[in-house]
Image (spheres, rainbow, N blue to C red):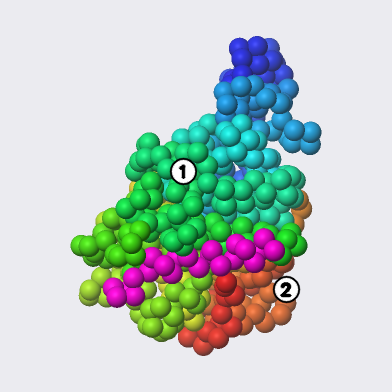
Amino acid sequence: MSYTSLGGAVANRDAEISAQATPGEIALQARDAWNTELKRIGVGGGTAARTTAFYTSVYHSLMQPQTLSDLDGRYLGADMQVHTIRAGQSAAYGTFSGWDQYRAQIQLLGLLRPDVAGDMATSMMDFAAQNNGIWDRWLHLGAPTHVMTGDPAAPTLATWYAMGVRNFATGEALDSLVRQATVQNADALSDAGCPGQCTGQRPTLNTYLALKYAANDICHCWGGAAETLENSLADFSLAMWAQRAGRHDLYRQLLPRGDYWKNTFNTAVGYQAARKADGSWQTGFTPSTDAGFAQGSSATYTWMVPQDVSGLAALMGGRPAAATRLDGFFHDENGNWAVLGGNALRYDPTNEPGIHAPWLYNGLGQPWKTQATVRQVVDTAYGVGPSGLPGNDDLGTMSAWYVFAAMGFFPQVPGRAEMLLGSPVFTRVVLTRSNGVRLVVNADTTETYVQKVTLNGGTLGRSWLPESFVQRGGTVSFTLGATANQSWAVKDLPVDH
């Protein structure tokens, strides 16, 4: 197969498949290649069904990005011209479901294959250069489709940088993404493709920067509140990247933009809401509305502030009040679990804007509720067989969520590398990154609730792992039980902002 030419396809075939090869031999090679990837995570001590679901999820998570380049390094670019990969780049990769993947899939890819993540970053950067400098939200192969909202390339590359990925032109990439976030482009005022495929990337940027929110009536975007939340998170992640890179002026410029989500939080109703350019709120609001949002309700999007859980809690009346509200997001009026989707007021495991929400309890000082909620989702929304996924896998995103949940930790926020703790469904997990770093998880049982945790032999009194765990490796050991320990990790809360 080749995306460049028939000759490229012939050369790829002749180099990869001998003339004497049989279909069975080729199938065995494919099986061996996949087993090499799956074995980067070894698990034990879980049930057969959970083990099957786990490895199926790892498989799903690694199906994208896909290799685009021929063996000679040529590939089809975003401009539909043939290009050659850069020196030191192993391959060009494409198909990036940005809005979906930056919430879980890219973190798992960065953990397992930082080498591929770096090559993917290079590919995305070159696709942007071939696309008039625009980093598109959703790449089909290397070409722009404009699907969804926000600026997902920014948190993606910032997260990889935080995880220690360095095999790409980091300064060049940061400069290009900052330019996209600060200089309005020619398509920013276009309504073409809206709502689902709005042509403008960082639409109506000048107005956004002046108002400090995306005005729903003139934003040329899918939904103003969603765009504001997405851009706030993207700008926060760029600020984190700039800080790590020692570019402190850029950090100070971008960090306040991570707070723009507050400007679409309507304190009168206690939710994110669509706001007009004149400052007024769009009429007819209910928490179930999708006006101003993209594939989700206000009730879901209101929680989409992983970079500032403390700030969100303050607007909700404090951490205890916010935790009580979160309880209502996962339970119905009678207190029963409501985590399977289908209700715009409740958690939806089938789509991305709220999939981080079960882990927010850690930042609210009630980590035992994260443990219970994540385990409920793992055991009811996921499984084996035709109903084993809660919805569209979105290029491995939902599967990556399951992989993290099963291992007992989950990325805290894009642009950083801390991990929030839940409870593992296996007694042993060994993850070996392609750079040789090993992450080990031990547990005495597979019960739901954390009783205590040690990190590299020392007692851990907080519900999160430092970035060093991802960057340099380590061993985290859980003591688990059947009842909630409501005194563990309730004070030393995850650092945000």
Please name the residue that numbered disc 1 is placed on.
188
Q: Nearer the viewer, residue 453 or 110?
A: 110
Asked if residue 458 lies left or right of residue 296, the reply is: right
Left or right of 466 in this view: 424: left
Give the residue furthest to the left: 284
Q: Where is 47 relative to 267, above or below?
A: above
Q: Quadrant of the N terminus?
A: top right
Mark in front: 2 vs 1: 1
The kind of residue on which mark 1 rests is Ala
Q: Secondary structure at mark 2?
A: loop
- Residue beneath disc 2: 456
Around disc 2, counting alpha carbons within 10 Å, would you say few (fewer than 14), some (14 to 19), or many (20 or more)? some
What residue do we see at 62% from left, 63% from top?
253
The region drawn magenta spans: 249-270
Q: Sequence order check: which comes first, mark 2 or mark 1? A: 1
Residue 27 in which image quadrant: top right
Q: Position of residue 160 (x, y in %)?
A: 65, 53
Nearest the eye: 221 or 2: 221
Residue 196 lies, in percent from the top left, at: 36, 42
Q: Is residue 371 visible?
A: no
Judge whether residue 239 can be spotted in this image.
yes
Amino acid at dot 2: Asn
Dot 1: within a 10 Å radius of its alpha carbon, few (fewer than 14), some, or many (20 or more) residues?
Answer: some
**Residue 340, horizontal then vertical, whole percent:** 32, 59
Residue 186 location in percent, x, y?
A: 50, 38
Residue under the point 64% across and 66% down = 252
Q: Is residue 286 magenta?
A: no
